[in-house]
């Protein structure tokens, strides 16, 4: 893959910055500076990347190609305002939900987005090569440079609008954040019955394999899909002391039933 | 593995009977008879297993060791009443939600349960060897025979009470039926934005790998876990025209937030 090595400033030292910084370094780029409001995180990541820790997000006197803002969505506007860079520096954020506009209003910068579509925890290594990276920029030249940068990290790079990226982020919340929570509830229910929580692993794996191979709605199984009212009532009875789980059960079961009415083909 | 080959009657010809029958035959047992109220299904499965199709669930004049009722939960009581077997035949059902008692009241039979914890669709082959099988019986001798039979199919055989099995089935609904539905919704949301639905696969795989390696509650990510109210409101806004998805979003997000309040450790 052809790309030029970039000098990068990482603004943020959380989970995304932690993994993205290492992937960029591994791809041959130079992480020159790391800034974070949390000094301990900043210093740990700077040490890991052999970068200079910055006390303030002021890069006006430093030579960099790209500043990457990998900060929580809620902090993005404030950090973007505080950040100072040399004229014509590319400044990107890494958020799934925030628009390009969040940076485009900053004077004198070439604004962009570089969103790695993955869930990151510091303790767990990830293979960046398989992570889709979604990019966007205000101008074509910036977009080309971001495409090259993203392409040096991953085989899957897509240019998408802020609007589509927001919808994708919403879809990811359903597919990942919400499914993870349901897996947590199922583990909790197993624990209540003193059952080993490995017991459901083959079923979970098969469910995921099937959902990837077919449209999930067309292979929906279970009491709600079958319209098995007795079992639904027994399950609600079992959840009587756990009103939140019970509410989740009710809402998802009626959604499954509404979907089943639109889908003639069902497995069971 | 040591076990004796059994002569088996399969009552039911749906997805469970379809896969269980083939796994039993592959393990060296003889499927002598197949009965189903749906003649076409019965004949197809009987042909597949080189078994005799039965016009009525009356096995009194036939030599069998075990009758396996693999029928929908809602039909179990009725089919169990109609079934007639020689005295002291083992009769089991394959349901996650139905108690042993559903068969134990039948006079002259040795009642049991043989529940393969997996989701079955006719079109998709499964490897029975990795499927946990949960067994239960009214008497020790029957339990031993079921343990041998289940052990001839799978490496994972557990004896559990009807109560624990019902709770396990409930946990499976959360971990599999509900997660599958959420994956369907996410696919629908991607389609609405004309995004390729393979885009989320790496994220889904990573979520599942993480949820298997850690307690899902401890690695929960996303706007609800972070308490990112702006993103939550934007997502609800995006779902304004889809009230069912919106309700699911609200209920799961508040459950994640309630859980997060009990869990000091969070990834993001």
Image: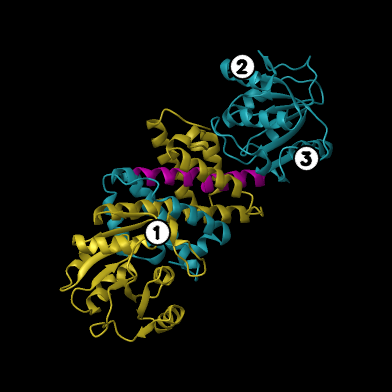
Chain colours: A cyan, B yellow
Q: Residue A134 carries which label?
A: none
Label 1 environment density (alpha carbons within 10 Å; few <14, some 14–19, many ≥20): some
Q: Residue A147 carries which label?
A: 3
Instruction: Please state the horizontal and vertical placement of residue B75, each as a whole percent of the image.
Output: 30, 72
Chain identifier of the residue bearing label 1 in the image? B
Q: In the image, is residue A183 part of the stretch drawn in magenta? A: yes
Residue drawn 71% across the image and 41% down it: A154
Q: In this view, does B250 lie to the left or right of A250?
A: right
Q: Report the magenta residues as a range.
A: A163-188
Instruction: Please state the horizontal and vertical placement of residue B51, each as a whole percent of the image.
Output: 39, 81
**Residue A6, quarter of picture:** top right
Chain identifier of the residue bearing label 3 in the image? A
Task: Measure the C-alpha gap from mark 1 to mark 2.
Answer: 52 Å
Label 2 environment density (alpha carbons within 10 Å; few <14, some 14–19, many ≥20): some
Residue drawn 80% across the image and 19% down it: A63
- Residue B236 visible, this orientation: no
Residue A163 lies, with reference to residue B111, above or below; the image says above
- Residue assigned mark 1: B154
**Mark 1–mark 2 CB contact (< 8 Å):** no
The mark that comes first in sequence, 3 or 2, is 2
Task: Measure the C-alpha gap from mark 3 to mark 1.
Answer: 49 Å
Residue B218 lies, with reference to residue A157, above or below; the image says above
- Residue assigned mark 2: A43
The quadrant the N terminus of chain A occupies is top right
Q: Which of B148 and B35 is in front in this view?
A: B148
Q: Nearer the viewer, residue B168 or B160?
A: B160
- Numbered disc 2: secondary structure: helix
């Amino acid at each position: 893959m052809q790309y030029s090595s970039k000098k990068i400033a990482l603004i943020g030292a959380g989970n995304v910055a932690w993994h993205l910084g290492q992937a960029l370094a591994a791809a041959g780029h130079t992480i020159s500076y790391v800034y974070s409001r949390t000094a301990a995180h900043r210093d740990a990541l700077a040490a890991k990347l052999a970068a200079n820790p910055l006390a303030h997000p002021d890069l006006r006197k430093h030579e960099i190609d790209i500043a990457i803002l990998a900060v929580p969505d809620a902090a993005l506007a404030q950090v973007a305002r505080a950040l100072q860079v040399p004229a014509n520096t590319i400044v990107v954020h890494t958020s799934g939900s925030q628009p390009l506009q969040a940076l485009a209003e900053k004077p004198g910068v070439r604004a962009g987005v570089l969103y790695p579509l993955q869930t990151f925890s510091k303790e767990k290594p990830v293979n960046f090569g398989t992570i889709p990276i979604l990019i966007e920029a205000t101008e074509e030249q910036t977009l080309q440079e971001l495409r090259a940068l993203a392409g040096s990290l991953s085989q899957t790079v897509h240019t998408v609008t802020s609007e589509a990226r927001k919808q994708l982020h919403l879809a990811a919340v359903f597919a990942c954040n919400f499914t993870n929570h349901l897996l947590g509830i199922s583990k909790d229910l197993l624990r209540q019955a003193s059952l080993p929580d490995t017991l459901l692993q083959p079923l979970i794996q098969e469910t995921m394999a099937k959902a990837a191979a077919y449209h999930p709605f067309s292979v929906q199984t279970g009491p709600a899909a079958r319209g098995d009212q007795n079992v639904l009532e027994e399950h609600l009875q079992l959840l009587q002391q756990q009103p939140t789980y019970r509410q989740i059960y009710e809402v998802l079961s009626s959604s499954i039933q509404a979907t089943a009415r639109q889908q003639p083909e069902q497995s069971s």
